[in-house]
Structures are given as structure tokens and as C-alpha cells.
Image (cartoon, grey):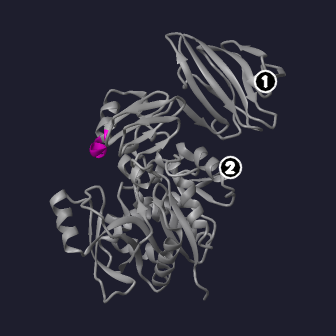
Amino acid sequence: MRAPVLVPVILCGGSGTRLWPLSRAEYPKQFLRLTGKESLLQQTLLRSAALQGEAPLLLAHEDARFIVAEQLREIGIHKATILLEPVQRNTGPAIVSAALQLLQRHEDALMLILPSDHAIEDHHAFAVAVEIAREAAQAGSLMTFGVRPQQAETGYGYLRANDLSGQSVMPLTEFVEKPDRPTAERYIASGQYYWNSGMYLFRASQLLDEIERYAPTLLDICRNAVTAARQDSDFVRLDADAYATCPSIAIDYALMERTTNAAMVELKAGWSDIGSWVSVWQSAKKDSDQNAVQGDVLLQSCSNCLVHGNDRLVAAVGLHDITIIDTPDALLVMDSRQAQDARKLVGALLEEQRPEANMHRRVMRPWGSYDAISNGRRFQVKRITVKPGAKLSLQLHHHRAEHWIVVAGTARVTQGEKIYLLTENQAAYIDIGDIHSLENPGKIPLELIEVQSGSYLGEDDIVRLQDQYGRA
């Protein structure tokens, strides 16, 4: 019997509220370009592609499916499986469902579980650790990757390993989920504990055998969700009714804390979970004054600052240990030493039902994006960008009319029975109730200004009649 194939399983469901205002509920941190020209998800995919395994399997919430697909396309990955979760239920149901899905295609598979929102500096050291864990997983161990802690950190889980005279694979004796500070300090002083990286490697068949022993109800629910899953274009949708009944439980609680087969490999690869703006600063390139900047930024007499600009100049004078994050609709200015409190700010925004907590002014769509430039009581102005070859749904509105003005590219407009082209400086008027669609037949992005007017301008005033992205 040949050795099982290695399949990277990428978990894309995190929210990253500590990195607000760049990370938001509808565009979380794994899709952001925080530490390089690729997003954290793309970096994870490229690292795993270098391991010579099979095409990856990604788990994502259905609302993020087009963002995931576009980020795969940007880096030339075309054979991945994207498994869609109708609701978020933590890592336990996600990983069990992935194992069931993989066993439909392979006699067995080694699942390399990777969060999509972590950064790793040393790719070679990462590959070496995976290879060591791979051999142990084939022999029957449920492998984790531990990181030697740099300080007492209350935002991480901890692993206690039984160090057997310097062996690479160490049996695990304890899992601890996010201890308080005195406990974390005691762990650091003992020298016996590691941070839990949230990465795992095990055989799919063995995972299911042990889940059947320790969490049989979870296994039954996930099996129903995978059995009733359906193919939808480039995606596999888990059955919504079955999956919604899953308990929200991490794989640590469901299995890893209870199994007797857990072991660990130390990961010495410059790992960070990019869990706060301090983590972003630590991972970034810095100037001689230890400032990390991105965008159009001008600093004078500043040190140890993180400044992220957007579409305008950000200038600062005489600041130290300060984080400044500028976006089109929100500005964060924060003492970097209080970075872990950023999630409290997001909680306050959610309580006030502020849209800035959930979405950016620029909203991604499968056909491109729109930027809500301005709005009033009965009007809204958007800048719309449509990718070459993409098409908006055939739709109508009950409460608003729309004016379109093309500023770049060519638009093919469907309006009732008419189909016509618009080029730069040409315009169209779509009245309330008109059946219409917009398409980019060209080779360059189509950009237009849309002025909406009417009694109600919400995105839910869209009646889709036909849609190539399955949203009708």
C-alpha cells in the first residue's frame, strides 16, 4: 500500500477583529496584504504549494467564496477544492468535514491543517518541520506544531511537551487554551510549554476513527452535511440544514485535548499569527527609528510607530509607540501597548450597529467591486469597477433609478429589449423597474460612476432574474 498523499487544508473562516479598521467581518485579515505583496491567504497557499503535495482544499464561509476564488486565480492556483460552510462552527466541524470530503477522492490522505491568516518568515524551516511531522503522522501520530514562546502571551493556547532527550517528535502531555497572565508567566518560566500554532498534520482516516471515539455526534452531523453537499460552479456547498446543527467547537476541545496519540514538532520558522497591530509591526520591515510604514506616509521625529496609509498622505510628528491605520471611512489612532484592546472597540461599533464594523467602503463582488463615494437621504454615488469578461446580474429595482457614466473601458448594457455599447464619457439612465444588466466585453477594467436616486437605496433592493454567479 503506497503512502497517503499530502493535502494542504486551508482554514479561511477567521474574522480578525483585532486588526480593525483594515480587517472587517466581510473582508477579514486573511485577505489583506499586511506583510508583502500577497495576502496572508496567498502566502499560505504558496508555502503549501512548495511542499509537493496535492492541490489544496480550502474551507470558507459561503459569503467569502468569490474573494477566495479571486485570490486563488491571482496566484495561478486553479485546481483547488473550495468547501463552503453555510455557517461558522469553529475548526472542529470544518476539519472533520474536510476529512470526509478528502476520503471521497483518496483512499487516505495526510491532512496538513493550516490557518490562512498566519505569517512564516523561514519557508525552508517550515518545510523541514512538515517533513518530520509527515513521517510521524504516517506512523499514527496526530501531529501539532509548537512555537517556543517569546513572552507571556494570553492570546495563544499552550502545549506541554515531553522532551525525550532532544528527539524531534515529542509526545504531548497537556493542551491549555489561552491562560491568564500569571499562568502564562509560570509556563514561560518552566521552559516546558510552547505556543499552539493551530497547525496540525494527521491521516484523514485516523482523525475520523478518533473523532468517532471522542465526538461521535459531531462525526454523524458532518457526515450528513458532506453526503448531502452539492456542487455549485467551482464550489462544494455543505448541506446547510445538517451543518447548522453542528456544535461550535475547536478541534482542540473535540479531539486533541483528549487523544493519547498527540505529538508535537517544534516550529522554528519565524511564525506569527498576526493577531494584533503589534504583530504586524513586528513582522514588517522597519526604518532606522523602528517605524514600519505602508502607503503615502511622512514621519518626523517618530519612533516605534506603525503607520498604514491609504489614498491620501498621512503625516505625523513627535510620536512614539503609536499605531495609525487610515482607511477611506475610518481612522484608528492607538497606543501600540493597548493593541489587544482593539477588539473592544469593534464590539462597541457592533453594539451601535455601525457599518464600519462589518464592511469597507469598497465592497468586493464576483464581477469586480464598488466604492460608495458619497450618499445622502435620497441619493448615493458609487464608483463601479467591472473586471474584463465579467457581468452583473440581470436585475431590477423597485425603489431607485440609476445613472451610469463610463469613465474608462467599454460597457455592454442590457436595458429591457435593448442591448447597446457605451464608451468613455457616454451615459445611460435606468429607470425604476427597468430590467437591466451591465457587462464588460473588453480587455481592460470597466470603470463607471453610478448615481442612484430614490426613496430606498439599500443593497437588498435588487431583484436578480439571472446571474452567472449563482445568486439569482
Characterize the magenta stretch by its predominant secondary structure.
Answer: helix
Count of numbered marks:
2
Residue range of the region highlighted in magenta in the rendering: 335-341
- State whether residue 147 is above or below residue 458: below
**Which amino acid type corresponds to the residue marked 2 in the rendered image?**
Ser
Check disc 2 and report the residue beneath it.
233
- The image quadrant where one finds the N terminus is bottom right
- Side (left or right) of 397 relative to 445: left
Residue 89 location, x and y as percent? Answer: 40, 53
Choose between 223 and 130: the one closer to the eye. 130
Q: Which residue is mark 1?
A: 414
Q: Quadrant of residue 317?
A: top left
Residue 284 drawn at (x, y percent): 45, 52
Q: Residue, x 35% and y 58% (percent of image)?
A: 249
Q: Is residue 24 visible?
A: no
Tell me the residue at 53%/64% (across/down): 9
Label 2 sits on a secondary structure element that is loop
The amino acid type, in three-letter code, at marker 1 is Thr
Q: Is residue 104 magenta?
A: no
Q: Is residue 258 left or right of residue 422?
A: left
How packed mark 1 is, by other alpha carbons closer than 10 Å (few <14, some 14-19, many 20 or more), is some
Residue 183 screen position, x and y as percent = 17, 63
Q: Position of residue 6 (x, y in %)?
A: 57, 74
Of callouts 1 and 2, the N-terminal one: 2
- Kind of element beneath mark 1: strand
